[in-house]
């Protein structure tokens, strides 16, 4: 997994990135909230609008496609 960001200070742009290995427990912990989100989205259609308002349509679309 790579974590990356771009920082701009006084017109100077710097890209920072760092690689990190994931063990199985870390991977499972990261997927738990996504699994819960997908479960709510699938089984509670009445909550879909609220999820999109809270997180934005782009995030909802990505979260429902991750798998």
Image: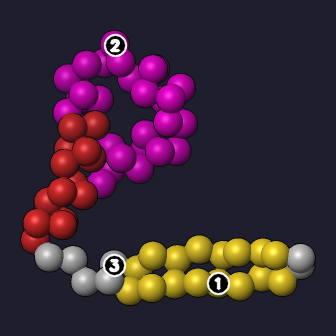
Give the numbered dot on residue 15. 1
Using the numbered discs, state the Cα–Cα distance from disc 3 to disc 1 in whole angstroms.
16 Å
Quarter of the image with the N terminus is: bottom left
Q: In percent of the image, x 25 and y 45: which residue is there?
A: 33
Q: Quadrant of residue 14?
A: bottom right
Element under label 1?
strand
Residue 25 in the image: above or below residue 13 = above
Magenta segment includes 5: no
* Residue 55 % position (x, y): 49, 36
Local packing at callout 3 (Cα closer than 10 Å; few below 14, some 14-19, many 20+) is few
Quarter of the image with the C terminus is: bottom left
| Magenta region | 38-66
Residue 9 in the image: above or below residue 42 = below
Magenta segment includes 62: yes
Q: Is residue 6 left or right of residue 42?
A: right
Using the numbered discs, state the Cα–Cα distance from disc 1 to disc 2 in whole angstroms.
41 Å
- Residue situated furthest right in the rendering: 10
First-in-chain label (3 vs 1): 3
Which color scheme did the rendering employ for the protein? secondary structure
Element under label 2?
helix
Q: Is residue 38 left or right of residue 47?
A: left
* Residue 39 % position (x, y): 20, 33
Element under label 3?
loop
Give the numbered dot on residue 7. none
Local packing at callout 1 (Cα closer than 10 Å; few below 14, some 14-19, many 20+) is few
Residue holding disc 2 = 46
* Residue 37 % position (x, y): 28, 37
Q: In percent of the image, x 30 and y 54: which residue is there?
A: 66
Residue holding disc 3 = 1
């Amino acid at each position: 997994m790579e974590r990356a960001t771009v920082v701009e200070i006084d017109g100077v742009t710097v890209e920072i990135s760092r690689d990190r290995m994931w063990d199985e427990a870390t991977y499972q912990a990261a997927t738990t909230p996504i699994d819960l989100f997908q479960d709510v989205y699938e089984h509670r259609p009445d909550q879909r609008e609220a999820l999109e308002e809270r997180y934005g349509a782009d995030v909802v679309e990505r979260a429902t496609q991750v798998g």
